[in-house]
Image (tube, rainbow, N blue to C red):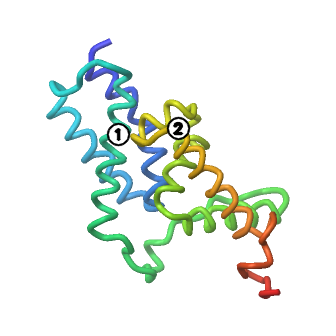
Amino acid sequence: MRVLDEIESAIPALRRYARALMRDRDRADDLVQDCLERAVANRHLWRGDGPVQAWLFRILINRYRDLHRRDPAPGHLVAIEDLAVEPVQFGDPESGLALREVRDAMARLPVDQREALLIVALEGKTLEEAAGLLEIPKGTLMSRLARARATLRVLTGRGPGADVLPGPGRERK
């Protein structure tokens, strides 16, 4: 398979990961486009020492980090017309609330923990693959995953320490 074909086949995974990182469809699409432009322009730099998708994820993650360093907090005010429309959820209303609670808690995770959790949980990468993509040791990845999961349990009120941080509808004990 040619490099350009492999780049094209990686686009859906790049978009999924970028949208989870950015939490904004337009900014995520811009990030993916920037990643793809860089990859195509610099495809001669790909050493062929691993999957093209891993190389693309490294480019995307590095661009995300560059953007995050420049503008770490884009602000908390969002025009109402810019809010994402939630899909209609049939069935148990509690599950929709729980899903939103987890999504909001993930948004509060530190960037390094969110990157690690999303690459493993959303993209289904192995610990070895994820560590390589994030360019960190496997032990560091495991530590970030453990801290992210523990923080999510606290933020969603589903684990030890849940009484430490108040969440929606919960009082500090």
Label 1's element? helix
- Residue 7's x, y, as percent? 32, 28
12 horizontally vs 156: left or right: left
The amino acid sitting under disc 1 is Arg
130 horizontally vs 14: left or right: right
- Residue 83's x, y, as percent? 49, 71
The residue closer to the viewer here, 7 or 66, is: 66
The amino acid sitting under disc 2 is Lys
Residue at coordinates 46% horizontally, 53% vertically from top-left? 19
Few, some or many residues within 10 Å of mark 2 (<14, 14–19, 20+): some
Closer to the chain start, of discs 1 and 2, is 1
- Residue 123's x, y, as percent? 54, 38
Point out the image quarter for the C terminus. bottom right
Q: In this view, does 49 lie above or below 36?
A: above
Q: Name the residue under label 2.
A: 138
Q: In which quarter of the image is residue 59?
A: top left
Q: Which mark is residue 159?
A: none
38 horizontally vs 145: left or right: left
Residue at coordinates 32% horizontally, 51% vertically from top-left? 31
Residue at coordinates 45% horizontally, 81% vertically from top-left? 76
Point out the image quarter for the N terminus. top left
The reply to whether residue 167 is in sight is: no
Which residue reaches farthest top? 1
Residue at coordinates 52% horizontally, 30% vertically from top-left? 128
96 horizontally vs 109: left or right: right
Q: Residue 58 carries which label?
A: 1
The reply to whether residue 161 is in sight is: yes
Closer mark to the observer between disc 1 and disc 2:
2
- Residue 115's x, y, as percent? 49, 51
Q: Is residue 167 above or below residue 84?
A: below
Q: How many numbered circles are shown?
A: 2
